[in-house]
Image: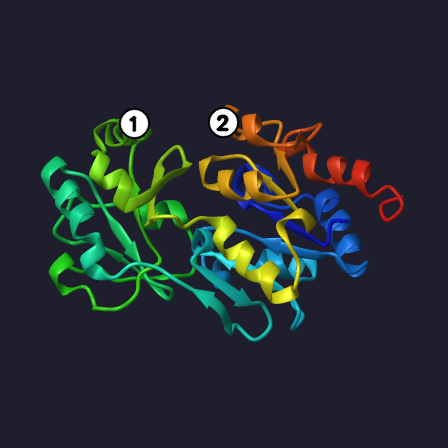
Amino acid sequence: MIKMIALDLDETLLNTDKTISEENAAALRKLHQAGIKVVLCTGRPINAIWGYLEQLGLTTSEDYTITFNGALVVNNATKETLAQSGMKRQDLELLHAFAAKNGYPLDVLDFDQVYPIADLTPSVYQQMLKAPMTFTKTAFAELPDHLYSKAVMATDALILDQVVDHLTPVMKQHYHVVRSQPKILEFLAAGMDKAVGLGQLLTHFGWTFNELMAFGDAENDLGMIKAAGDGVAMLNGQSGVKAVANHQTPWDNNHAGIAAYLRQVFPTNLK
């Protein structure tokens, strides 16, 4: 029995124009009201997606969000942390050296703000993110010595193709590297992904992955799609995601594919 529905945002729940269709929203609100947990899973902080949470009615003390691709599980109403993990500055030294050697940009995120690394090639992450976060340009050596959720390279898609091709075996062991968007490459702690945060949240409620349905489209969704009792790939999803999914939505993200799939699985709730 499905007790929790986890949803990626970009190219999954969101249309290409970054909005949630009312058809998708209405279906999720009905299931939430019926007692099924609806959990957004994103690389963004919670304040950057608050409008979506309000639209879906996910603002009670029993609602949670998976943020920073699994590194932070946060209560929507109180903003209190249920679980948190990440990397220290020294964990990022290998990545900084790689970026400096090859002329790549780098942004480092903690759980409150973004640090565009000032001694590297300028980044376009702020323009791409378009989120209410503080961006503080900082030289790598001057980064505060505390916990960081992830690092990001945001640049032309062809350049990121080169980055992926040049990643060394040591880097692949040291970081979990995912392409969340064509122009965004994310570096997480080894073993970190959305499934980690979801596992912590499921344990909080006393549930298992068998009781989870998860929707996604891209590399950073693979972990939760594989782990879920019902992993659902978007019709517009990447081939690698479709290969590991249990099912696929009948329509793409721009045609309320999530609502269409949910009507198949929950016909009584979504008449």
The answer to whether residue 50 is visible is no
The residue to which callout 1 is attached is 161
The residue to which callout 2 is attached is 240
Query: What's under tag 2, amino acid-wise?
Result: Gly
The spot of residue 244 in percent (x, y) is 56, 30
The residue shown at (54%, 35%) is 217
Per the image, label 2 sits on a secondary structure element best described as helix
* Pick the front one: 172 or 248: 172
The residue shown at (61%, 44%) is 228
Label 2 Cα crowd, 10 Å radius (few <14 / some 14-19 / many 20+): few
Q: Earlier in the sequence, mark 1 or mark 2?
A: 1
Is residue 210 toward the left or the right of residue 169 in the image? right
The spot of residue 121 in percent (x, y) is 16, 43
Query: What's under tag 1, amino acid-wise?
Result: Asp
When asked about the image quadrant of residue 44, the answer is bottom left
Marks 1 and 2 in Cβ contact (< 8 Å) = no
